[in-house]
Amino acid sequence: MITITEIESIFDISLTSIDNLTDNQIEDFIVALNTLGSKEKIENYVDPQWVVLAGGKGSRIDPSGQLNKTLDIWFGRDNVLDLSRRHLPTTRPHIVVVNPSLHQRLVNQDDESNHSIFCVQQEANGTGGALKAALPVLQQSSAEFVGITFGDEPFLPPNIFWLTLISHFIQKADITLCAKKPLTVVDKGGLFFDRDGHFIGTKEWYDMTQKEQAQMQKWLATGCAYTNTGITLVRREAMIERLNQLELHKNGTEYHFVDLINHFYRDGLKTNAYVYQETVLSGVNRWSNVLEGEIMQYKQNQALLTELGVRVDPQTQFTYQFKADQLPQIGVGCHFLGRVHLDTDVKIGDYCRLENTSLFGRTTVGDGVSLKDVTAKDSVFLGNSTTFPISEPVFGLRCQTKVEEANLTAVQIGTQVQLKLVNANATVIPCRSVVQNRNLGVPTSPRSLWWDELVTEPYLPGVFTLGQKQHEDDWFQLRQHILMHAKNELITRSTSNHLLSKIAEQTVADFLDLKRWNGKFVISELTPEQIWGAVFEMVKLATGASDPYYYDKRQARQTAFQQLNRLSSSKLSWQQKLKLVIAGNIIDYSSARVVKKLAKNASYFDQVLSAAIEADLSIDCFNQFKNLVIDASPKSIVWLVDNDGEVVFDLWLIEKLAEKGHHITIVGKPEAASNDATVTDIEQVVEHSFFQFLPSKIHNGQVRIISSGSVTIGTNLHQATYEFANSVLDADLVISKGQGNFFTTKGLNQDVFYLLMSKGVTAEVATGIAADQSQLIDGLILAYVPAGTHYPNTLANYYDSL
């Protein structure tokens, strides 16, 4: 025995919620099912495998064939094919029959999901031909019954499939066709019955005799004419046995699967016609049908919004992605205008104004928010306190948060925020922020012609994502470490105002807690470098401090010049100069560890840099550097700088390389990011009296200073400017300074010399070099990685394998 509850649990639906389904029909349905045998057998019988016929080209929609009616006509988030099969009662994958060109598009778009099996109808030989194309899959199916429907019927109501299915079992049928009462019978497939009322089959208008056409017109006048919707349920094995008996129609070009009904009738099997009593709109084989369906859909949705208490502009085109028994969660006093789309998990607060807005995923809009021309996914707009009066002239509502022309993904927007022309990804925008014409948060991969040329492997702007560490016991402590580092190192440098500090700290905490629709933390997708870049930007927005490390950078710069004056007077070899340039990274007043050592030993920098000149290189590619740079004919070199202090040493060596004829492009940050050198910083350092020839080299164009576009630790290639990307592609080689640049430029399609010190766990894991802590300085690396080199492990392992 099987119960109503068990049937409902199979399909995740309440039978009582199906329109026009009576209690008596439900009772008869359950009784009929329980005559079929065991519970397992019933579950198999009642769960058909649906075949969706979508092989048509839609030539009446677009004679050129470029626009496909099933894939290229969208209603909200769904195209015609998606809408046509959204209500099919089954737990099995849909078998979708498509033509070859459509199949290729689906493959290219990676649309072959786990809930679809695509079969290719190689020639346009009708609906019967489409069913034959699905035959190999149907032969492997375990379903007792097969459902058949069309992929260009987006306006079919959800109950039509259920009522057909239930009628099929109540009538104990072998084949059931769903019919409708038409407005006209011309050019339609009409249903015919024998004298005893048994369903014989259908005929297309052009296949009917004049007598049959006249009979259809007579039945139409008396309200007894029925035409074919195409929705069919058929016993699988009986259908397979008779598929080869189908005969050609339309001058021998098409098979019609509905001819199976007549074969079943003649063979004494039970045929059934279920007549759907409500209006059924036609599919999208003409633009007039598309328009008619849209008007119907929008009117239904407008009526739904009105019931929910939403003020709906008369021209609003509202679409939503909810189950049939769900309602959108919308607060009181809202106003919708233009095109508005809401996804399943979207929630709207009170007194919100949405105009030309699409909200996807797990997005929540709090009270008093105005969105115009906005697309948001997995985002949160914090609610504002209600202020009076609630309304205002022209716009209707006095919304305190106003977002216009924005594209937001995984973003939290604070209260009383004003945004315009903003693209944001994976970030938190603090309360009371006013931002215009900006890209915020973590940049995504650019869609640029040069991107595939710039990198040679799947690119990650860092060594690992936090999600790769999520299995470790201290993962939540890692998040807490990020928060405390932001508070103690960044926020304290940004402001002394208690209120602004609290806002900045809360902004970072909210960012670390931000989740996507599937419950995963947003930061789990990001590298530490991406996270730090986003945090730096958030704190900048919250406090207004554009360069929190300004004084640390100036102090490091001063110290670097002092050390360079002391050491450059000695006659240093090229190898010693390179070691000094690498070790210059130690001058870092933003490092608590370095500051602590200086407090204990005022001569710390003197001793370390003097020792560096004589230290061994842990990875030593000096010979390659000598051959390719020092002793080579003039080359075009791109130099990625790191910290502000050590940039003094970089420019010292760059000046000497320029004297050898090399053309050098120096790359800095476009704006402050930690203590890294910006373009402005580099230009200021160049003007120092220490450099005798460098200003003239810049003046004549032999040396250039440009921005990478990256505003984070290292060089996030997702932010690369066209100028930077072209400079790298046109260069003979790249010289990359510091750990950050090493972590973020792996896979760069260019010969690269990496000059860095291995400091900390991440560097040790990535380079394979653990510095000897008993030495004043150790872990100096001068590594050469030719373009196209792939090394899955560490730098040290790569060199050991050579």
Image: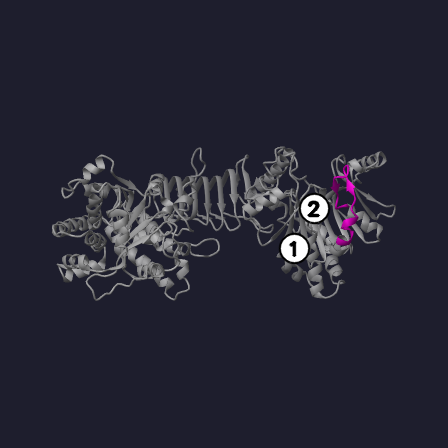
Residue 285 seen anywhere in this rendered image of the structure: yes
Residue beneath the point at 41% across and 44% down:
453
SS of the residue at dot 2? helix
Residue beneath the point at 42% across and 56% down:
521
Looking at the image, residue 732 lies above or below residue 600: above
Tell me the quarter of the picture where residue 684 sits: top left
Tell me the quarter of the picture where residue 670 sits: top left
Q: Earlier in the sequence, mark 2 or mark 1?
A: 1
Residue occupied by mark 1: 90
Identity, as a three-letter code, of the amino acid under mark 1: Thr
Is 250 a magenta residue? yes
Residue 547 seen anywhere in this rendered image of the structure: no
- Residue 177 place in picture, x, y as percent: 75, 48
Q: Residues within 10 Å of mark 2 (few under 14, many from 20)?
A: many
Q: Nearer the viewer, mark 2 or mark 1?
A: 2
Identity, as a three-letter code, of the amino acid under mark 2: Ala
Q: Residues within 10 Å of mark 1 (few under 14, many from 20)?
A: some
Q: Answer left or right for 571 relative to 55.
A: left
Which residue lies most toward the right here? Answer: 195
Name the foreground residue: 17 vs 398. 17
Residue occupied by mark 2: 130
- Residue 270 place in picture, x, y as percent: 81, 53
Looking at the image, residue 801 lies above or below residue 163: below
- Residue 7 place in picture, x, y as percent: 67, 60
Task: Look at the image and give the residue range highlighted in magenta.
Answer: 240-258
Name the foreground residue: 92 vs 741. 741
SS of the residue at dot 1? loop
